[in-house]
Amino acid sequence: MDSSSANDATPIYIREVSVTSFIFEICMKPLSCIRSSPIFNFGGHDWYLMWKFSSTKEVHLGVFLISDQEVKATVDFTLLDKYGNLSSQYKRISRTFSSKSLSNYRDMLLGNMSPENHVTNGCFNVLCTIFIDGKTTTPKLNQNPNSLVKQINNLLLSRDISDVAFEVDGKTFHAHRAVLATRSPVFKAELFGQKVEANTNCIKLEGMMSEIFKELLCYIYTDTTQDAGTKFNQHLLEAADRYSLDGLRKICEDRLCSNITLDTVLSSLGFADQHNCSRLLDSCLNFAATPENLLQLTLRQEYLDLMKSFPFVFAKLSKRANASLAFQNIVNKKQTVG
């Protein structure tokens, strides 16, 4: 890399605006060399932004991974106008990022992004949104057979000293009152509160699937949980709310934010509104309001269902999309062609 590498970063203002999006304020000068931002963290990985201006003052942008592993991701760049609204200048790059390609400037986006009309006080703003593909990795238990986590996990698997059982969706799960009460204030009230019934050795739970309760117990005993897809994480988040497990709720919301697709975003919007998941709602709105995505989503029945069932969310989506000149331009082009 040249003298303008990540270690010689040009001062730049970075502002996180949502769980997946950052705004970079970039100065127009100098124009003659590749420059880079300070390192920022997203999705558990370290990244930095690089940019270079061409002779025609078009900006070339690229995001580079520093972490020592490969990450498959999609990165959207949108220039913001002087008022902070999305402009019509939008670019996307989807690939597997690797620290081995740090000096591969060919990965930078080229052409058609001209910030000159959006400059204020010598600088312009770029909205960068990153979507990481794939599943969240579940931490492995400490393999030391004498470790506390391993021993507590073995406690969950053992029925010998369990003192309470739960019947969930036709299946029985054995557990330990002290562990449950220590982790969850709801379990504490149900198992040790003043209104505890005399016979609480086997408690029947309604409104929960057995695989979700099994995963709930796994989190309570080991602080780890698997990622089995969007629907699974939605149900697990509901269970976390039911038993006031804030840490589990955060894990589920992070997973849902990291796995937004065209097939899941509309249902996730409604779910986020129902369960007061502000970060998930913001991430879904950012994804759905992207011009290319919104045009595909409007053709789906789920989009009409969202209009009817969640008018408040739909109004937010419409407002965010209408702020994008890129969306307006695409609609106008379609009408002209038609």
Image: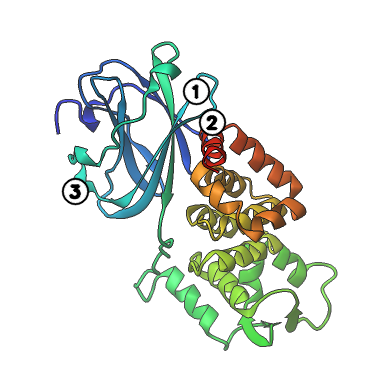
- Could you tell me which residue is drawn at 55 percent across and 35 percent down? 332
For the question of whether residue 56 can be seen, the reply is: yes
Choose between 323 and 287: the one closer to the eye. Answer: 323
Residue named by callout 1: 81
- How many other residues sit within 10 Å of disc 3, few (<14), some (14-19) or many (≥20)? some
24 left or right of 219 in image: left
Marks 2/3: CA–CA distance: 37 Å
- Pointer 1 and pointer 2: residues touching (CB < 8 Å)? yes
Select label 3 or label 1 by which is in front.
Answer: 1
191 left or right of 263 in image: right
Q: Position of residue 244 (x, y in %)?
A: 67, 59
Select label 1 or label 2 by which is in front.
Answer: 2
Q: Position of residue 300 (x, y in %)?
A: 61, 58
The mark nearer the N terminus, 3 or 1, is 1
The mark nearer the N terminus, 2 or 3, is 3
Asked where in the image residue 112 lies, by quadrant, the reply is top left
Choose between 202 and 112: the one closer to the eye. Answer: 112
Q: Position of residue 293 (x, y in %)?
A: 52, 48
- Could you tell me which residue is drawn at 61 percent across and 37 percent down? 320
Q: Give, as a three-letter code, the residue at label 1.
A: Asp
Is residue 145 positioned above or below 82 on the image? below
Marks 3/1: CA–CA distance: 34 Å
Task: Look at the numbered disc 1 and give the secondary structure of its residue.
Answer: loop
- How many other residues sit within 10 Å of disc 2, few (<14), some (14-19) or many (≥20)? some
Q: Using the image, tell me which numbered label, if any, was put on residue 325.
A: 2
Farthest-out residue, top:
121
Quarter of the image where the C terminus is located = top right
Marks 1/2: CA–CA distance: 10 Å
Residue named by callout 3: 100
